[in-house]
């Protein structure tokens, strides 16, 4: 699929399903590389989950970096995106190479039944578009799906929450403040680093979170 078609399909879904799509354009290659950097530092084979893959902008980097013998699950709520991804696993050469070890699940993450925990989770979920309780549910779900020592990466558009807080009606402002609190709390416990990616529309931060390797359930505190 060429970049123009990908952008067009993405933009159509942005217009039809603004809340879940949450962006006007798919992620750039630079953002995709930052999100998938945990795949380069770990020894394979790995269990990898991508949440909210959309048209596959980040997926195309995952399939290139997936260590031999890994398992790859994708969870996408939008059936048009899920169909497009299945098509890519059949026809796009990079995707086809790992098609046998990959599965596209068309459902919300909240309904996904994981067979085993994951070593790496890459999320494209647009947290700022969701009600605060849903953000809390989704981020804790991702963290609970991580194996001990597992890593999660997700992106946020730079300074969007503080800017929207300044210009939005009070209801949105309160919702965004609650999201900020929820994320800051998880950052204080799990964040290992933040990458700044300027070549993306709009520029983005990649947040890297890691679950302790001790095997104790760090989530029981929440
Ligand atoms: C901002 S787009 C990111 C798409 C792609 N990862 C990228 O970076 O270009 C958000 C994606 O999350 C999906 N999504 C939103 N809510 C979801 C949920 N609860 N479970 C699974 N996917 C969801 C949307 O359909 C969309 O594909």
Image: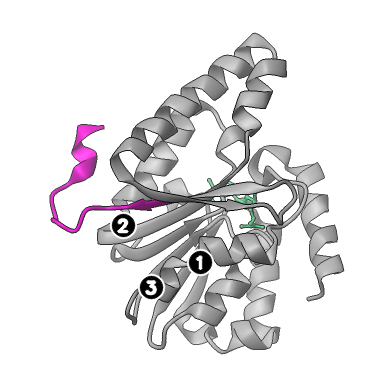
* Residue 148 as seen in the image, left or right of residue 163: left
203 shown above or below 50: above
Mark identifier at residue 164: none
Mark 2 sits near ligand 1, with its Cβ under 8 Å away = no
Name the residue rendered at 63%, 40% in the picture: 158
Name the residue rendered at 25%, 61% in the picture: 149
Indicate which disc, 1 or 2, sits on the residue closer to the N terminus. 1
* Residue 48 as seen in the image, left or right of residue 173: left
Name the residue rendered at 19%, 58% in the picture: 213
- Which image quadrant is residue 115 in? bottom left
- Mark 3 neighbour density, 10 Å: few (under 14) some (14–19) many (20 or more): few
183 shown above or below 191: above
Q: Could you give the CA–CA distance between mark 1 and mark 3, rounded to whole angstroms?
A: 10 Å
Colour mode of the rendering: one colour
Residue 104 in the image, given as x and y percentages of width and height: 54, 68
Q: Secondary structure at mark 2?
A: strand
Question: Viewer-proximal residue, 59 or 187?
Answer: 187
Q: Quadrant of the C terminus?
A: top left
Q: Nearer the viewer, mark 2 or mark 3?
A: 3
| 209 in the magenta segment | yes
Q: Which residue is mark 2?
A: 146
Residue 216 in the image, given as x and y percentages of width and height: 13, 50
Q: Which residue is mark 1?
A: 36
Q: Which residue is mark 3?
A: 41
Indicate which disc, 2 or 3, sits on the residue closer to the N terminus. 3
- Residue span colored magenta: 208-222
């Amino acid at each position: 699929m060429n970049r123009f078609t990908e952008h067009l399909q993405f933009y159509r879904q942005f217009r039809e399903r603004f809340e879940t799509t949450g962006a006007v354009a798919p992620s750039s290659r630079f953002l995709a590389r930052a999100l998938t950097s945990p795949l380069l530092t770990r020894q394979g084979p790995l269990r990898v989950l991508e949440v909210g893959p959309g048209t596959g902008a980040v997926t195309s980097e995952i399939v290139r970096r997936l260590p031999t013998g890994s398992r790859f699950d994708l969870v996408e709520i939008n059936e048009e995106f899920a169909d497009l991804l299945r098509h890519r696993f059949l026809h796009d050469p990079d995707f086809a190479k790992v098609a046998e070890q990959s599965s596209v699940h068309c459902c919300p993450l909240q309904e996904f039944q994981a067979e085993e925990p994951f070593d790496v989770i890459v999320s494209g979920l647009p947290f700022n578009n969701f009600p605060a309780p849903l953000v809390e549910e989704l981020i804790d779900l991702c963290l609970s799906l991580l194996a001990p020592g597992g890593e999660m990466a997700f992106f946020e558009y730079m300074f969007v929450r503080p800017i929207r807080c300044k210009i939005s009606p009070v209801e949105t402002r309160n919702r965004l403040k609650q999201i900020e609190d929820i994320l800051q709390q998880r950052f204080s416990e799990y964040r290992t680093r933040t990458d700044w990616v300027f070549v993306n529309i709009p520029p983005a931060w990649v947040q890297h979170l890691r679950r302790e390797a001790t095997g104790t359930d760090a989530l029981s505190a929440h």
